């Protein structure tokens, strides 16, 4: 088992949890974009409209797994974010970035303090409870998705120069490839709590940024 974990094929398993962060990103994106789209279409600005939108979005979830539980908890704070995103977009986006940094700092400290690993398949029960399934630790990709939804809604006619777009794609693909392959590097080396802490605090928002930039490029007509 130990030898097999050091094979590159095993990276598909160790990096598999990043798929969950992709879903969190998409969840936040669809939430903010859908809300802003509905508001611009129906031109309503009252509690009943928002209440109906929030009811339909939240009660779609049935808490059958930790993912749905975390997603439901994030929906609980969505009214505050969405209302401020509509009225104070810049401050709200900055607040989302600050929340991502705080979440990353939390993951860093708790990993160092408890010697948590960097992989969910090797994690202890504490790692599973306080990092892998904790809403506060899994929040950054969702918040990045919320901000991305706003950026897509307000920049649908943006024109990105070809050179800049190529650089954007190259950077995204390189970043995502690096994130996947770093799993292999970590499995082939001895455990280092500092490395694990940096990994747990940075890998999920970094992955979300890579996927998010590709989504933004495709949606705005720069996918190819």
Image (spheres, grey):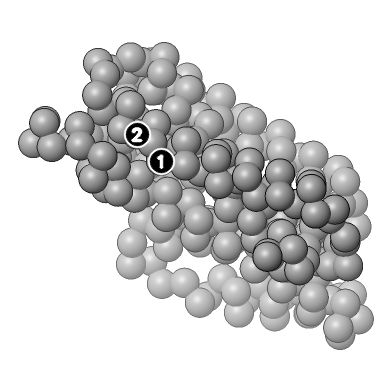
Residue lying furthest front:
163
Crowd tier of the residue under label 2, counting other residues whose Cα lies within 10 Å: few below 14, some 14–19, many 20 or above? many
Quadrant of res 97: top right
Quarter of the image containing the C terminus? bottom right
Q: Is residue 97 above or below residue 186?
A: below
Q: Are marks 1 and 2 in contact (CB under 8 Å)?
A: yes
The residue that mark 2 highlights is 183
Answer yes or no: is residue 165 visible: yes
Instruction: Please identify the quarter of the rendering in which residue 119 is found.
Output: top left
- What SS does tag 1 mark? helix
Identity of the residue drawn at 71% across and 50% down:
166
Report the residue marked by disc 1: 180
> Percent from the top left, x then y, of residue 76?
60, 59
Residue placed most toward the observer, 134 or 157: 157
Near mark 1 (Cα within 10 A), the count class, few <14, some 14-19 or many ≥20, is some
The image quadrant where one finds the N terminus is top left
């Amino acid at each position: 088992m130990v030898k097999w974990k050091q094979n590159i094929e095993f990276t598909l398993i160790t990096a598999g949890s990043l798929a969950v962060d992709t879903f969190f990103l998409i969840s936040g994106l669809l939430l903010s974009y859908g809300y802003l789209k509905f508001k611009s279409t129906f031109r309503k600005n009252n509690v009943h409209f928002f209440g109906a939108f929030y009811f339909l979005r939240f009660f779609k979830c049935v808490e059958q797994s930790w993912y749905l539980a975390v997603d439901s908890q994030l929906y609980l704070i969505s009214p505050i974010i969405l209302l401020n995103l509509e009225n104070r977009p810049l401050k709200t986006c900055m607040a989302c970035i600050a929340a991502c940094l705080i979440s990353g700092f939390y993951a860093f400290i708790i990993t160092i303090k408890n010697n948590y690993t960097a992989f969910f398949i090797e994690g202890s029960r504490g790692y599973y409870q306080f990092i892998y399934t904790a809403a506060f630790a899994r929040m950054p990709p969702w918040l990045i998705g919320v901000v991305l939804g706003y950026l897509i809604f307000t920049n649908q006619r943006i024109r990105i120069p070809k050179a800049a777009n190529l650089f954007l794609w190259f950077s995204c693909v390189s970043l995502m490839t690096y994130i996947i392959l770093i799993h292999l590097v970590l499995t082939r080396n001895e455990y280092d709590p500092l490395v694990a802490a940096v990994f747990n605090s940075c890998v999920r928002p970094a992955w979300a940024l890579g996927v998010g930039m590709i989504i933004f490029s495709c949606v705005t007509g720069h996918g190819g």
